[in-house]
Amino acid sequence: MSEAAAPGNGFHAAWAAMLRTGHGAAVRPGVLNPLIARTAELLHRAAQEHPFRPDLAGQVGALLIDNHFTDPQLLADAVQLIQSQPVPDDRGPALSGAFAAGWAAALRERTLREQEAIRLAADTARQEVEKALRASEARFRALFESAAIGIGLGDTDGNILAVNRALGDIFGGGPEDMQGVRVNDLVHPEDTPGVWEAYEELISGKREYFQFDKPYYRRDGEVVWTHLTVSLIRDDDGSPLYQVAMLEDVTDRYRLQERLRHQATHDPLTGLPNRAAFFERLERLFESPEPDARFGLCYVDLDGFKVVNDSLGHDMGDQLLTVVAGRLESALTPLGHLVARLGGDEFVVLLENCRGEQEAVAAAKTVLAALTKPVVIGDHRLAVGASVGVLERRIASTTPGAAVRAADLTLYRAKEAGRGRWTLFDPKENARAVSRYAVSVRMPTALDRGEFFIDYQPMIDLSNGAMTGVEALVRWRHPQLGVLGPEEFVGVAEETGLIMPLGRWVLEQACEQAAEWVAAFGDRAPKLSVNLAVRQARNAGLVADIERVLRTTGLDPSMLQLEITESTVVGPEDEALKALHALVDMGVSLAVDDFGTGWSNLAYLRDLPVSNLKIAGSFVGDLHDPAKDTHLGWRIVSGLVSLAHTLGLSVTAEGVESRADAERLRLMGCDLAQGWHFGRPVRPAEIARRIAEADPERAAGTAPGAGPEGVDRRHAPDAAADGKHHPAVSAPEFAAEPEIAPRGDDER
């Protein structure tokens, strides 16, 4: 080798530069510099020593491989560099060939070692995975077999694939007994609603799991209750693969709950359903009844039971009650009726899906027949009788509380009539009984206790659909009888004189509320209409009372309308007529309420200072009575409207319950309307909400002469000169028609 190839000369520098370029290898300087020196020295010796030792060049190639110089480009560059240097005896090709052979052999050896290492690592990993999988399967199998709750595995076709021992025990057999069974074979009549719908959604992949309490039949025919949890297992692509069910036996807990529920809902003495169970069953009837669904109640009270208790002792009385309960249950339960004990010696029979009054009366007769024979207890033969109050109604016409009150009051009518008999519910008698009872027991102090409140019913301008007025309707939240409408207490309050403080309170509260609406909404606030009882109208202090209320509340007199009945004034010289004129002079407007229900004296009507006639709701209601001439009824209503307009009065129709009636009234010229079609009586906050949501421009768009009540048409003769009514604007879009319900609280 020439001097140029010796270490330290140009070859050394070129060799060092080549190795320092890296060729993909990252070698620290502390390793690279000795490597450069060592490989250059070996190449020098291979080129100079005699005899020629090509293996030294092969060592250089191996050293480079050992230090991660494995880039094929490095091999090409190194061979080219070695061949570019002059060496003695033409050793250049042999020298570069030996280098290349050593480099290649070392690279092959390195590759083989790495492959073996990878193989060993992969084999070790596989063995570890298999070992872990076996351990996992063993743990799962141990958990599956020894779990305290039942576990079952099934496919998405409903086939049960495997179950554990606990699940077999739940069904009263072994795991092998469940083979071949399908999930759909496990239906039970008392399955929770929705359980099978949830199952179908799960196996179709629409849900991941569900939980229910579900009963099953054991192999011995007994019923076992379980808490069931079913989960869906998906494959790697997310498709449903398996279903896993876990069942916990909760039979003991369920039976305990059933016993507790039975104790809570059944009378401990007689075993009959108690008051709570009866009301629960009754209220369930009212949740979503069919439109024409009916029901019946027989309210039963034993005659002379107190004598038995007082003379023979409570133990004898309890035995008597037990026998009576057994007789009633035996006679009425086979007919599909519920018999319950409400307390003491009071029982009730509930007739669901009653077919009419005859069936309810038949049930009452069955009650009396069951008690005709004496009850033998020890040495005593006890004659027992009963009085029965019978109620049969359409479900949509009442409420559970009102129905029970009515049946109870009917029972007392039966007792008053002589006992040992049944009496059928009479709405008029019931109303009178409720009123007498409520007033006599509670009304004198009810005002002081804050039991009265006021709802407000919208009054709608038929020409544009705007709410231009509200009627104040007093309610009584009676602590025993619940919420009572005015028809249940106002009549008796008038008879007893209690109407005076009540009427004064209503006027004060309603005017205060109306003033608040005016302050909040300005001219969008509705006009207030308040009923004035006959006794109030005839009171000498009426005008002073109203002046005081308007002054203290700040309500403008023009925002108040008082409703009077036709019987308020009996003649042109009546003192009440002077008071009414004084109120109108003050700015308060008057309306005749329930016009047409009495013997209307048109001459008196001409003299009354009223500006509005309110057609009684019974007129509109009768228009739907198939037993009455509908065509004639509409002609009468039309005549009343024409009469009012001829007298320069506006007209309000009460009891409007359908869109069709509202539209027909509008076309015949009726000005205002109220009724359940436009809104039931509601709390003041709901009226405020309706005002706030109304379109201000629409509410203000009422044309003169077609506006809200209170406009004195006697000063606008052109509006009714031809006896006809001319609406100022096109027909309004009335609200969607609600379900027609009974009146009673809707107008008063």
Image: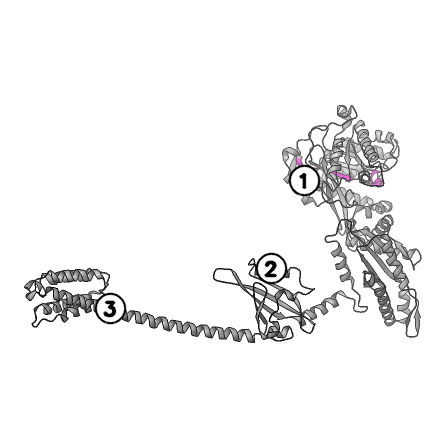
From the viewer's perspective, tell me whether residue 77 is left or right of residue 50: right
Residue contact between numbered discs 1 and 3, judged by CB atoms under 8 Å: no
How is the rendered protein coloured?
one colour
Q: Which mark is residue 108?
A: 3
Q: Position of residue 310 (x, y in %)?
A: 89, 68
The magenta stretch spans residue 74: no
Q: Earlier in the sequence, mark 2 or mark 3?
A: 3
Measure how far apart labels 1 and 2 are at the Cα level: 56 Å
- Assign the N terminus to one quadrant of the image: bottom left
- Assign the C terminus to one quadrant of the image: top right
Q: Which mark is residue 517?
A: 1
The residues colored magenta run: 524-538
Residue that numbered label 2 is attached to: 200
Towards the viewer: 187 or 19: 187
* Amino acid at dot 3: Arg
Residue 512 occupies quadrant: top right
* Amino acid at dot 1: Trp
Measure how far apart labels 2 and 3 are at the Cα level: 62 Å
Residue contact between numbered discs 1 and 2, judged by CB atoms under 8 Å: no
Residue reaching furthest to the front: 180
Q: Earlier in the sequence, mark 1 or mark 3?
A: 3
Residue 577's place in the image compared with 337, above or below, is above
Q: Position of residue 443 (x, y in %)?
A: 81, 51
